[in-house]
Image: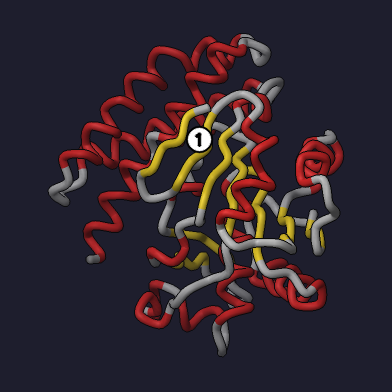
Amino acid sequence: MAQMNYLTACTFDFGALAQTPKVLKAQGGARPFVVTDPGLKANGVLDKLLAALGAPPAGVFADTPSNPTEAACQNAADAYRASGADSIIALGGGSSMDLAKAVGLIVTHEGPLARLGAAERGTKHIKKLPPLIAVPTTAGTGSEVSVGAVVILENGRKETFISPFLIPSAAICDPELTLGLPAGLTAATGMDAMTHCIEAVLSPVVHPPAEAIGLDGVERVGAHLERAVKDGGDRDARWRSSKASARCTGSAMRLAASMS
């Protein structure tokens, strides 16, 4: 079981999901609110997380849309408050993680969500959020190590929120959760990981460790993504693709450096 500390403390390996209670406790959480999407509820992945938790969570929001909207974020935030939760677990791809970050923003900050967005230079207003544990089910978006989130506001604008406080407190990366992912989604998220790794290499921000991580990720995606696409049950390819996705942190490290 690997422990990787970059911007986010990542617990990585097959079976890592079983470490969820331990990781949650280490981050000060006792009553987690789970954010996920309808697909993961339908295919049983949510049940795997709930089984790993042992005790029932404070609440579950399983209606994350493919592109998080302000309305969905507000609904989830209302449910969070009503549940008495003290922490958040985001289960899924980038959409669930971004919505979970937005929930953290809404329940800890006053005023409209828009005032915290990049368009209104809202980064300076963003402060500490509840502990957020990210559990990715795809190998690609890198939101589990990212300083950002994207939400479609009520006015129709696709807004970006950026702050070191949006980096999840911890991530649990279990390649087991990616087994059987459809070929198209595997390819798309894998190339997303490649893009983030390339960003880490080409960014003008000076950060040699981030560049090295990005180069390693590019090599891993190039060597193993095609195998994962061809055979969704290839455990070795899934393990290596998930490790490549974790290398998306290189891009996040450079972005964080540019904000300091």
| Residue tagged 1 | 140
On screen, residue 138 above or below 182: below
Q: Position of residue 86 (x, y in %)?
A: 68, 69
Q: Position of residue 88 (x, y in %)?
A: 66, 60
Between residue 252 and residue 161, name the one nearer to us: 252
179 sits to left or right of 7: right
207 sits to left or right of 44: left
166 sits to left or right of 46: left
Residue in view at x 73 percent, y 51 percent: 36
In which image quadrant can residue 178 be found? top right
On screen, residue 207 above or below 15: below
Q: Position of residue 27 (x, y in %)?
A: 56, 58
Is label 1 in a helix, a strand or a loop?
loop
Between residue 176 and residue 226, name the one nearer to us: 176
In which image quadrant can residue 87 be found? bottom right
Give the number of callouts. Answer: 1
Residue in view at x 66 percent, y 54 percent: 89
Amino acid type, callout 1: Gly
Q: Position of residue 69 (x, y in %)?
A: 65, 65
What's the colour scheme? secondary structure
Residue in view at x 22 percent, y 37 percent: 211
Image quadrant occupied by the C terminus: bottom left
On screen, residue 207 above or below 191: below
Residue in view at x 65 percent, y 52 percent: 90
Q: Residue furthest bottom?
A: 111
